[in-house]
Image (cartoon, rainbow, N blue to C red):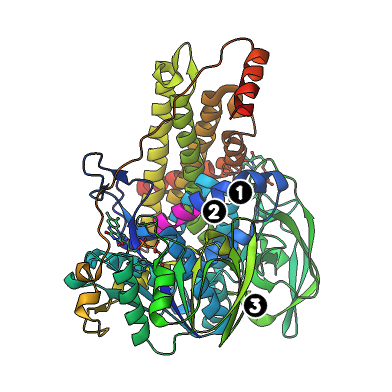
Amino acid sequence: MHIVACIKQVPDPSQARIDRETGLVIREGVDKIINPYDLHALEEALRIKETKGGKVTVLSMGPASAEQVLRDAIAMGADQVILLSDRQFAGADTLATSYTLARAVARLEDVNLVICGKQAVDGDTAQVGPGMAAKLDIPHITQVRKLRELTEDKLVAEKLTDRGYEVVEVPLPAVITVVKELNEPRIPGLRGMMRAKKAEIPVWGPEDIEAEADRIGLKGSPTQVWRTFEPERHRKGEMLEGTPSEQAAALWQRLRSL
Amino acid sequence: MDYFLTEEQQMIKDLAARIADERVKPVAAELDEKEEFPWELMKVLGEADLFAVWVPEEYGGLGGGVLEQALVVEELSRACSGVAVSYAASALGSFPIILFGTEEQKQRYLPDIASGKRLAAFALTEANAGSDVSGIATTATLDGDEYVLNGTKQWITNGGEADIYTVIAVTDKTKGPRGYSAFIVEKGTPGLSFGKKEKKLGIRASATREVIFENCRIPKENLLGREGQGFVITMKTFDRTRPGVGAQAVGIAQGALDEAVKYARERVQFGQPISSFQGIQFMLADMATQVEAARALVYSVARWIDSGAKDVSQAAAMAKLFASDVCMKVTVDAVQILGGYGYMREYPVEKMMRDAKITQIYEGTNQIQRSIIALDLIKKAARKNK
Ligand SMILES: Cc1cc2nc3c(=O)[nH]c(=O)nc-3n(C[C@H](O)[C@H](O)[C@H](O)COP(=O)(O)OP(=O)(O)OC[C@H]3O[C@@H](n4cnc5c(N)ncnc54)[C@H](O)[C@@H]3O)c2cc1C
Ligand SMILES: Cc1cc2nc3c(=O)[nH]c(=O)nc-3n(C[C@H](O)[C@H](O)[C@H](O)COP(=O)(O)OP(=O)(O)OC[C@H]3O[C@@H](n4cnc5c(N)ncnc54)[C@H](O)[C@@H]3O)c2cc1C
């Protein structure tokens, strides 16, 4: 089995703040981490390899600094990593990102399964997984919470929905995007960390994936952000007066009239 | 404070800290309550290669030593020293093999210990042999190609859970401690069984159990070193593991200090956080100073031992003695700072205070450590005056 995990480097959401003036994320001085959902994607890829044999390739598109998340992936046990990094890739929207990642997958040999996170915690669109599947012209399942059955050419998975879950079967190769319930990501070991520190991280540019110049980066991105802003808050606190039982009665009235 | 750890040592400490915070802390109270052996966490530590840090590279380890082991024990103890001692006992059980094992013995046992696949334990104490090891009654008699072991060891950490036991037994009754020998016994050997699991004041996640030998036959090749070396092997082993007990004490004390500082800033009495009272501040200052002094001593001694120094028993005893006394004092003070809440199981400091006590008792009580230190002083002075 050849499993590909796609991981994105994101600002640590526990530290990230928004600049109120510009509406942009303040990235300076904020630690960069693997998108939390992508840890589950990578973990599942590694578990499949451990039970079924095969190899795990990890892809990330981003600036040179995204190399770090790929080192983390090696520490966890990835066999091969590739950084997609080039000035021409910069400014990609979800369309261009999906195209670029799909081109990279197409360059790899005999891929059975591509695993993405449910969504990136910064971009938050949840479009890249399905977008890649469309570009590769293969099926996809989003929000996977459990793999029930996996063979060389078939996957049966549980897909999380608002009311429960659906059981979906797809032929392979396919793309899945995964939720946190799927597994608990491992903590890398010392040997892995040492291997990761020394590893060479191969970098691929547009030529390596034979990408069309007008479908990548800013040029390949029809979406434009006009304005980002924090929604106005209409919340206002109200104190209920009186004895505890009067307050409880008043609260009950208020809730009923909602 | 910066202790100028190497990049690798810092990596080890950070990784152990991460596991302590993410995996151990959330379950520490439950493990204590249920007195449950933390197998799942042992597996996590194994996968993280942390059992490999004190094992030589030739035998599947990472080639570190006493300091590397101490760094892990310290961090784990911050979260739960019951977990930490289950880990540390594997070092206690394997140092005799590292120090005195034949090539064949090392090849056979160390790789599985380094990977965490098998835990080790060290069995010395008996009902009538605590501080005074001359009371050991367990015997090992050579019979053809086998030794036959008979006797009962008590209070053996990892008893029943470990696969590999280093056991001290009498091979020559006429020679006292010079007639002791050390053996490797594997779980599953006919004649080896385990007695009752003790109910303890602290470190309740760890297993403390009797190890019983009834005509237990082991191959002659399982003798460690030579016959009669059992006492020396024990002392050389303790030289390497006592700083680890010191590290355990430093970790528990650091955990208690962290909780005390956090609580002092949050708890409001007389209209202000209790951290604004000088009476509390001075307690915190003393606690922090003592913890740092203990850590500095433990690290220095560990490093010195790892450098290959010879005459280290006194220093190892000092590290264990000082750190464990600090730990007891600091945890009692932490409970005091948390007041009534500190006495409740909802807060972690009462457990830390219970856990602290053992560090003054095992691997030689603190009275015994003081004897070692004093006798060394007196012996050296006598030699000089000759
Ligand atoms: C300030 C800002 C401005 C932006 N402007 C635009 C814009 O104008 N138009 C627009 O369409 N988008 C815009 N984006 C979104 C940005 O282009 C997306 O981050 C990117 O396309 C991926 O989409 P996503 O983050 O929503 O990922 P999702 O679709 O939510 O990610 C799902 C999964 O896809 C995989 N994945 C996603 N990105 C990568 C990657 N780079 N490398 C490897 N795997 C990946 C991961 O497995 C991830 O869990 C902007 C984002 C920010 C923060
Ligand atoms: C939780 C736990 C785990 C343990 N794990 C192990 C293990 O893995 N392997 C193992 O072999 N053993 C283990 N032990 C045993 C431990 O090492 C002994 O308990 C310890 O050495 C003290 O022996 P004792 O309890 O018999 O105390 P005793 O020797 O009976 O001492 C009682 C008191 O007398 C004092 N005393 C004794 N002699 C002197 C003296 N000469 N001068 C002054 N005071 C003295 C002692 O300091 C102590 O205060 C463990 C014990 C416990 C409680």
Task: State whether the magenta stretch is mostly helix, strand or loop.
Answer: helix
The mark found on residue B27 in the picture is 1
In the image, taking residue A212 as reference, residue B13 lies left or right, namely right
Residue A38 position in % (x across, y down): 44, 64
The tag earlier along the polypeptide, 1 or 3, is: 1
Q: Please, what is the three-letter code of the amino acid marked with disc 1?
A: Val
Left or right: A257 in relation to A130: right
Measured in 3D between alpha carbons, the distance from the residue under mark 1 to the one under mark 3, in whole angstroms, is 38 Å
Query: In percent of the image, x 35 and y 55: which residue is there?
Result: A122
Q: Residue B23 shows which numbered tag?
A: 2
> Which amino acid type corresponds to the residue marked 3 in the rendered image?
Asn
Q: Are marks 1 and 3 in contact (CB under 8 Å)?
A: no
Q: Is residue B238 above or below residue B276?
A: below
Chain ID, mark 2? B
Labels 1 and 2 touching (C-beta < 8 A): yes
- Horizontal relation, residue A250 to residue B334: left or right: right
